[in-house]
């Protein structure tokens, strides 16, 4: 779903464990790490896209997580010009994302990177909450900063950590 301005509707997921660390996934076949994210399908709500992407990208079901928060506004990033596919119609110039913050309440064995026909990640780890800011590709850094700031006060270690 690409809007009239050229932005593809997308959701982003910050998945935190009980220690306040976040899920960090390595894109399959690349040396690039990111949070789970994915495009919304026509007629799909952000929450429906959240659970579909959570299953497709890391094999988790709704019972494996608890929703802590969601951004109110769309957060946007522009693609670098060499990544824009001008031959595609409509042309996508970037993404607008609703971000969700989730608490992981399952077992680590529940995380399955190969649950989809075309996996997104081939490795993952738990990292410090702010670690992704220095590690994500440059054109996504501002959106990551906005999303992490939005949820910083609610991602705290739980007492049993």
Image (cartoon, rainbow, N blue to C red):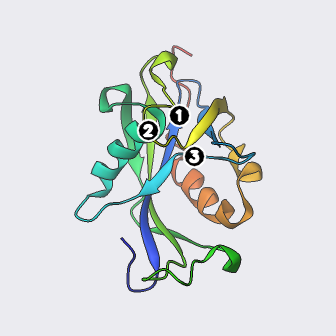
Q: Mark 3: give few (<14), some (14-19) or many (20+) Cα within 10 Å.
A: some
Question: Is 142 left or right of 74, judged from the image as shown?
Answer: right
Find the residue positioned furthest to the left.
43
Name the mark on residue 35: 3
Q: For this rendering, which residue is in front, 151 or 33?
A: 33
Residue under the point 53% across and 83% down: 87
**Which residue carries the number 2 mark?**
102
| N-terminal label among 3 and 1 | 1
Residue under the point 53% across and 34% down: 16
* Occupied quadrant, residue 4: bottom left
Please say if 70 is above or below 10. Answer: above
Quarter of the picture containing the C terminus is top right
Secondary structure of the residue carrying numbered label 2: strand
Q: How far apart are marks 3 and 1 (CA)?
A: 11 Å
Q: Residue 126, percent across and down? A: 64, 29
Mark 2 and mark 1 residues within 8 Å of each other at the beta carbon = yes
Q: For this rendering, which residue is in front, 91 or 40?
A: 91
Residue under the point 57% across and 78% down: 85
């Amino acid at each position: 779903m690409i809007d009239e301005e050229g932005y593809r509707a997308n959701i982003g997921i910050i998945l935190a464990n009980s220690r306040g660390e976040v899920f960090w996934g390595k894109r399959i076949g690349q040396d690039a790490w990111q949070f789970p994210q994915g495009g919304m399908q026509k007629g799909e709500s952000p929450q429906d896209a959240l659970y579909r992407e959570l299953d497709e990208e890391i094999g988790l079901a709704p019972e494996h997580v608890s929703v802590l928060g969601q951004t109110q506004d769309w957060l946007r990033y522009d693609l670098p010009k060499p990544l824009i596919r001008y031959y595609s119609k409509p042309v996508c110039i970037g993404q607008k994302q609703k971000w969700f913050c989730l608490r992981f309440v399952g077992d680590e064995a529940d995380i399955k990177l190969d649950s989809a026909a075309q996996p997104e990640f081939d490795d993952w780890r738990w990292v410090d909450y702010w670690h992704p800011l220095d590690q994500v590709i440059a054109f996504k850094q501002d959106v990551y900063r906005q999303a992490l700031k939005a949820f910083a006060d609610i991602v705290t270690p739980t007492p049993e950590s």
